């Protein structure tokens, strides 16, 4: 378990920011494939050194745990590609070019949730509480319907219960699953959202 925490720490420090900038499941899959190849190379190099030092064994163990974490994340990205409609495929012709950046932005479930909350004249703070309540209800296991977005799974982030919610198009299988929505991102989306559109 300690090694998994180390692998998660490596992920957060080195890769999480770059990963968050990716828009499509296909980009995520390519990102993970590249990381897995690079990490496997490091594992092979360490194994070939064949040094029995404690430091070397610790590095090897950490890299192997990171490899397992990356494989798990790759599996999730592949499932998303199967489940989510991608605007990069058939849908791209149906989106007017002047709206495409808007639509790309609004593929996130909290955007649809915010639109519905604003239509009900629910203030920002209460809307975030309502969103967290849905995550508490879902617990990553029960499907939740987001108005005009569809059915997804939500979960409170155990490392930051108050300020982060995780979502996934498929049921959560481990603590590593889910796409993060922070309170800051939610608040900014709420402020940006125009109910007249």
Image: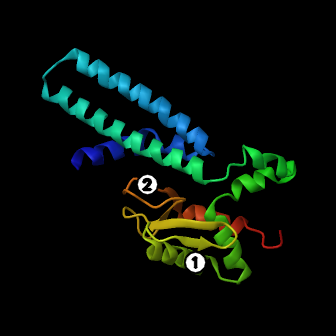
Q: Position of residue 190 (x, y in %)?
A: 67, 69
Residue 16: x and y, percent?
A: 47, 44
Q: Residue at x 48, y 48 (%)?
A: 76
Q: How many marks?
A: 2
In the drawing, does residue 14 fall left or right of residue 182?
left
Relative vertical location of residue 163 with respect to residue 38 in this rendering, above or below? below
11 or 172: nearer the viewer: 172
Instruction: Tell me if 88 is positioned left or right of 44 in this view.
Output: right
Which one is in front, 15 or 104?
104
* Mark 2 vs 1, N-terminal side: 1
**Marks 2 and 1, how far apart in space?**
26 Å
Residue 104 rendering spot, x and y as whole percentages:
72, 52
Q: Residue at x 24, y 44 (%)?
A: 3
The residue closer to the viewer here, 141 or 59, is 141
The picture quadrant where one finds residue 6 is top left
Quadrant in which the C terminus appears = bottom right
Way the structure is coloured: rainbow
Query: Alpha-carbon neighbours of circle 2 within 10 Å: few (<14), some, or many (≥20)?
Result: some
Query: From the viewer's perspective, is 20 left or right of 99?
Result: left
> Is label 2 in a helix, a strand or a loop?
loop
Element marked by disc 1 = helix
Query: Residue 172: image x %, image y %?
Result: 43, 60
The disc placed on residue 177 is 2
Give the residue at x 50% y 59%: 170
Find the residue positioned furthest to the top: 49
Looking at the rendered image, the disc whose residue lies closer to the viewer, 2 or 1, is 2
Task: Determine whether, in the image, residue 71 is placed left or right of residue 122.
Answer: left
The residue at which mark 1 appears reads as 125
């Amino acid at each position: 378990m300690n090694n998994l925490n180390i692998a998660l720490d490596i992920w957060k420090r080195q890769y999480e920011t770059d990963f968050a900038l990716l828009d499509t499941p296909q980009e995520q899959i390519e990102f993970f494939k590249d990381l897995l190849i690079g990490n496997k190379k490091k594992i092979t190099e360490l194994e070939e050194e064949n040094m029995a030092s404690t430091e070397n064994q610790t590095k090897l163990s950490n890299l192997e745990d990171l490899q397992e974490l990356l494989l798990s994340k790759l599996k999730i990205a592949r499932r998303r590609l199967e489940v989510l409609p991608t605007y990069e495929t058939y849908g791209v012709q149906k989106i007017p070019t002047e709206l495409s950046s808007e639509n790309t932005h609004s593929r996130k479930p909290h955007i649809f949730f915010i639109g519905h909350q604003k239509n009900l004249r629910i203030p920002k703070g209460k809307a975030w509480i309502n969103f967290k309540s849905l995550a508490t209800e879902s617990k990553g296991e029960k499907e939740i319907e987001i108005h005009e977005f569809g059915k997804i799974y939500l979960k409170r982030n155990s490392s930051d219960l108050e300020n982060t919610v995780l979502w996934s198009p498929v049921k959560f299988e481990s603590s590593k699953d889910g796409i993060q929505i922070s309170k800051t991102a939610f608040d900014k989306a709420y402020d940006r959202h125009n109910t007249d559109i």
